[in-house]
Amino acid sequence: MAAPTEQVTGGGRARDEGSGPVISVRELWKVFGTKADQVARSAELRALPRRELLARTGCTAAVSDVGFEVSPGEVFVVMGLSGSGKSTLVRCLTRLIEPTSGEIVFEGQDILHCDAKQLRELRRHKFSMVFQHFGLLPHRRVIDNVAYGLEISGTPKAQRLKRAGEVIDLVGLSGYERSYPDQLSGGMQQRVGLARALAGDPDVLFFDEPFSALDPLIRRDMQTEVIRLHHEVGKTMVFITHDLSEALKLGDRILIMRDGRMVQMGTGDELVGAPADDYVRDFVRDVPRANVLTLKWIMRPPRPEDPLDGPELSPDVVVREATRAVLAADKPVKVVSNGNLLGMVGDEEILAVVAGSESGA
């Protein structure tokens, strides 16, 4: 591959590069066990693999020294297999689980220093969660489920019902306002959960594997729905999943975890183009590379014999999208950024990736 990568940075389709991060996580630990505080204070114990730590102390480090930032408007995905610590991490970010040590700075405020009242206000007005299990109130109609968070925060009835109606329409449930949850399909119930999370107009939405219990077709529909809503409302999102295809579809950047620790963080093309180790390499092995890699990963240096009057493409164009233009050109395509020639792409480079994608390589 031609392009190096910064594994802890990445682009994003909706990121605001001119402002600071919405969330900054630094040296975050969550240790379960009677000696949790001892583990957090000991550099020797913190360095131990999870199994050895358990054997020596009886403690389990569910989240180990995790740090990252989330930019305004970014969809930040945390993924890993069962037991990787991803769900514990997202619960720490909202203090549904109390971290053992570290910092979680939300819009400039370390929420680990918030008292119960401050934390309650943050949960009511600044961030919302969407869970795998919808948690809808079965005796309440859709509109009342969506308005529930506004109700407990003291919003007047007319105002909260008006807002609930707006977000019900936003998630495509118009006409079902008076239905009860058991009258809806699983996908529609998850839309109710999504509308409920949006009703309070939070700054950040946290998703904890919200679609993993849904049928594959409904799951794809809901992924598309999240993308549509992200483009429409521009919310910052932190999304937890064990599904790489879901992560690649939704995420501006992806953090892969294993045994509570960060393995690699970057954009989808960075993970596929330059996996940090065999663990990540196994994760991305079956990804159709032409659908993820951009031209910067397959371009070659210009050769003396290359004509330089061929068509131009950006290095950020996905290989699949560039295939027709490259194969139709009678000269190698120039990969250009800000007027600078970065490299060349011809039939050979394109077909090597496309053929590998088709064969599953």
Image (tube, helix red, strand yellow):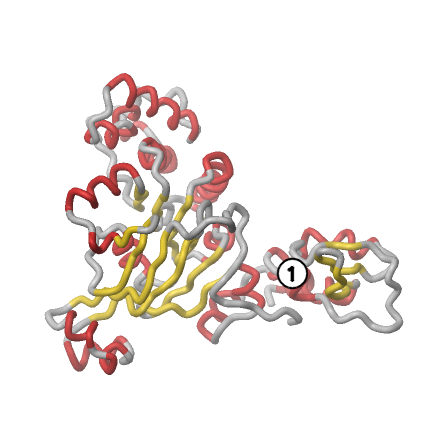
The one nearer the camera, 351 or 41, is: 41
Q: Position of residue 50 (x, y in %)?
A: 26, 75
Closer to us: 283 or 109: 109
* Badge 1 element: helix
Residue sitting nearer the eye, 61 or 353: 61
Residue 12 visible? The answer is: yes
- Residue 77 in percent (x, y) is at 42, 54
What amino acid type should be assigned to the residue bearing mark 1? Glu
Asked whether 342 or 222 is in front, the reply is 342
Q: Residue at x 51, y 49 (%)?
A: 18
User: What percent of the width, then of the height, locates residue 269?
Assistant: 57, 61
* Image vertical order of residue 251 relative to residue 189, above or below: below
| Left or right, residue 181 beside residue 70 | left
- The residue positioned 74% from the left and 58% from the top of the image is 336
* Residue 213 seen: no
Q: How many marks?
A: 1
